[in-house]
Amino acid sequence: MKKLNAIIFTLLMVFSIKAEVSKLNVVATLPDLGSIAKEIGGERIKLTVLANGNEDPHFVDPKPSFIRVLNQANVLIDNGAELEAGWLPPLVNNARNPKILGYSPNHIIGITGVKMLQVPIGKIDRSEGDVHPMGNPHYLLSPDNCLIVASNITESFSKIDRQGAQFYQKNLEKFTQRLNEKIIEWKKMLQPYKSTRVVTYHKSFDYFIDYFGFELFGTIEPKPGIEPSPSHINELIQKAKNSDVKLIIIEPNRPKKTPNQLGKTIGAKMVILPLMPGGGGSPDDFFGWYDYIVKTISESLKQ
Ligand SMILES: [Zn+2]
């Protein structure tokens, strides 16, 4: 009997190790993409997210350990709108993993099917270090775009892990249903503040502002990725003085002195909002992150 128990135990161990090994090894560049991958992949994936929620997604610290992580990945999920252009390409090249290069189900390009804001017409101007030369890459701040990305992820996971196709599809349905319910709740919470004028540090919340009907009055950065000069701030103050701007939105990684002073001068409140899950002490799951943003805005405007 003891022997039989030992055999059963060994078999169980082998099967559990096998289950662990057969999990899809997924790498997401950023926590917003990772949080959606988690909703779809659940326990069938082993997820690694390269950046943390407090980092600037344009300038993530490219740790050497990322090369090994990328080398072993089955799937890479990236933003695809040049958001990671400043740090990801050398890591992917050094990882020498043919699976995640180019176009294949193993390389999920989040932006596929998303309508990007601020796409330049005509010549692309990269002068002065503008980090949004192709358009605004912060598209996951629109819930509708999150649904598109979730469906891109489902399609790829289902192609690579065919046995899990039904599981992923079910999770997509669950995610879609919950998100649609949440959208109604979030719109209701923000409805009283429609058309409120806001200033942001970077052009990072444009999709959110657009989606929930706020008005972007101006930005502290003169151009995305360019730090403000005193004359730019003075211009912004003059413009904003009698314009009833209520909120100044900054990300957790921004310097607080200038936005704070600006807020005091023009009578607006400064709030720190997480551009990505886990940033600024927000929850690191998808719905917790969005809930936190909506709640923070509605509470700041209520007072
Ligand atoms: Zn940006």
Image: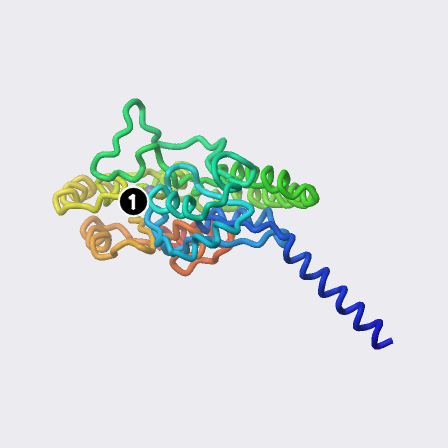
Q: As displayed, is residue 78 above or below residue 46?
A: above
Residue that lies at the very extreme toward the bottom in this rendered image: 2
The kind of residue tagged 1 is His
Name the residue beneath numbered marker 1: 202
> Can residue 300 be seen from the camera position used here?
no
Q: Is residue 231 left or right of residue 218?
A: left
Q: Is residue 140 left or right of residue 152?
A: left
Q: Position of residue 78 (x, y in %)?
A: 46, 43
Indicate how the structure is coloured in the image.
rainbow
Quarter that holds the C terminus: bottom left
Q: Position of residue 63 (x, y in %)?
A: 38, 56
Report the label total: 1
Residue that lies at the very extreme toward the top in this rendered image: 122
Q: Is mark 1 within 8 Å of ligand 1?
A: yes
Crowding near the residue tagged with mark 1, few <14, some 14–19, many ≥20 C-alpha atoms within 10 Å: many
Q: Quadrant of ligand 1?
A: top left
Q: Quadrant of residue 153?
A: top right
Q: Nearer the viewer, residue 2 or 239?
A: 2
Q: Nearer the viewer, residue 108 or 204?
A: 108
> Can residue 145 be seen from the camera position used here?
yes
Q: Is residue 290 left or right of residue 259?
A: right
Q: Nearer the viewer, residue 51 or 141?
A: 51
Q: Position of residue 114 (x, y in %)?
A: 47, 33
Q: Residue at x 72, y 62 (%)?
A: 14
Quarter that holds the N terminus: bottom right
Q: Residue at x 83, y 77 (%)?
A: 2
